[in-house]
């Protein structure tokens, strides 16, 4: 495999913008085999307005692969399997250098790894000349999955599905499919979480007596949630979203050592959603591997939902979001690319 690239038209650097993929129905646990293949089906929405901006360039000769997040160099071992596999799949020999910024807190349970690895996969594919190829979406989804399974979904906008056992996600519908769809993200903290999803789901798989029942039950929940999504039934989808995250957290809570992500404000927000539903306002929360609470509601209930969440947890910042578009990708102009240092063409 050669380190040189064949076409003079290929960019030396690209800029990619992606948004995180919020699972309405959760992926939690991997199939054995070490390839980041999900054990449960996830149904997700890409969130508008929360942005990851990543610049990926061909590394200079002699330079290794590197990733910086918010200006901080990231541990190379976290990214090595991804870059090695990316080179193999993209049939290139050069190394990649990436720098990334999030417009929202990183590693705090806001799915920053989904948008991060999606941007990286799209950027690497573009540098290898796979941009514009109709297969790129699928290829980038498969590559992104190697970094973080939720990232397989974030290479698409709108609503996505990552089936259990699948190597790539599918785009279900664009962002306009459900115009009333809103998500209020309540930030219970801006601090970084201690347990990565990766380690936590593996610990759940290997030590929780509730892991197998979780995986079994998730089949039914995801099937029913997909049907509710297909008929735009907010009430049904909302109820199934709640079952999904609560059962995921129940399996993690039963691990050894147990994993409890919730803070007092998370619980206050969960209870506020229950009180809203009791008075006929549709508000269905979900949580990931962190204390943040994300509330699905329809646009007509947004004011009531925000007011109740604010009252329940006044210190929590609220971010209102909706289904977002797919990623943007632009080659960097030749002079900018050469400033960041590109390999020989
Ligand atoms: O893809 P990872 O390793 O960041 O794990 C994502 C796990 C959850 O956010 C809890 C659920 C999901 O499907 O996004």
Image (cartoon, grey):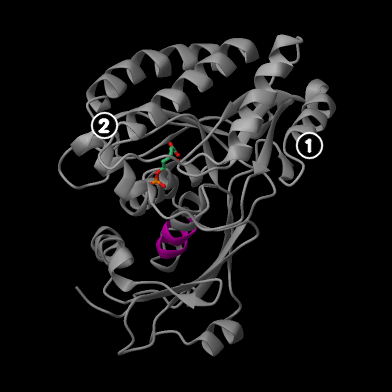
Where in the figure is residue 305, as x and y percent of width and height? 77, 27
Q: Looking at the picture, how far across and down is residue 147, in whole percent?
A: 35, 54
> What residue do we see at 28% from left, 69% from top?
77
- Residue 281 in the figure: left or right of residue 212: right
Magenta: main secondary structure equals: helix
Element type at marker 1?
helix
Residue 64 magenta-drawn? no
Going 40% across and 37% down the picture, which residue do you hit?
169
Location of residue 62 (image quadrant): bottom left
Q: Which residue is mark 2?
A: 165
Q: Nearer the viewer, residue 304 or 78?
A: 304
Q: Does 40 appear above or below 20?
A: above
Give the residue pinned by disc 1.
310
Q: How crowded is the residue under tag 1: few (<14 C-alpha within 10 Å), some, or many (20+)?
A: some
- In the image shown, does 186 or 28 lie closer to the viewer? 186
Q: Which residues are magenta?
A: 119-125
Task: Name the quarter where the N terminus is drawn.
Answer: bottom left
Callout 2 secondary element: loop
């Amino acid at each position: 495999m050669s380190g040189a690239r064949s076409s003079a038209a290929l960019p030396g650097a690209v800029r990619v913008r992606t948004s995180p993929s919020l699972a309405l129905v959760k992926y939690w646990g991997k199939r054995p085999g070490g390839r980041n293949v999900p054990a449960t089906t996830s149904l997700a929405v890409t969130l508008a307005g929360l942005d990851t901006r990543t610049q990926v360039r061909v590394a200079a000769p002699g330079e290794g692969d590197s990733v910086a997040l918010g200006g901080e160099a990231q541990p190379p071992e976290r990214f090595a399997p991804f870059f090695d596999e990316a080179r193999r799949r993209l049939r290139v020999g050069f190394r990649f250098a990436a720098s990334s910024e999030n417009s929202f807190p990183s590693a705090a349970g806001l799915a920053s790894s989904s948008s991060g690895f999606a941007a990286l996969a799209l950027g690497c594919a573009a540098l290898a000349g796979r941009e514009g190829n109709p297969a790129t979406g699928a290829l980038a989804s498969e590559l992104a999955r190697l970094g973080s399974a939720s990232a397989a979904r974030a290479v698409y906008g709108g609503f996505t599905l990552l089936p259990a056992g699948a190597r790539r996600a599918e785009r279900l519908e664009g962002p306009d499919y459900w115009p009333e769809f809103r998500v209020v993200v309540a930030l219970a903290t801006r601090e970084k979480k201690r347990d990565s999803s990766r380690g936590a789901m593996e610990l759940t798989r290997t030590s929780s007596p509730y892991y197998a029942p979780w995986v079994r039950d998730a089949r039914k929940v995801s099937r029913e949630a997909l049907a509710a999504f297909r008929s735009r039934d907010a009430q049904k989808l909302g109820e199934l979203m709640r079952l999904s995250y609560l059962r995921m957290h129940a399996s993690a809570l039963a691990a050894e050592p147990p994993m409890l992500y919730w803070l007092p404000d998370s619980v206050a927000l969960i209870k506020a959603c229950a009180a809203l539903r009791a008075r006929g306002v549709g508000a269905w929360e979900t949580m990931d591997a962190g204390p943040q609470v994300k509330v699905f509601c329809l646009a007509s209930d947004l004011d009531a939902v925000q007011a109740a969440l604010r009252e329940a947890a006044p210190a929590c910042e609220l971010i209102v979001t909706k289904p977002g578009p797919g990623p943007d990708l632009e080659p960097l102009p030749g002079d900018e690319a050469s400033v960041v240092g590109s390999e020989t063409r």
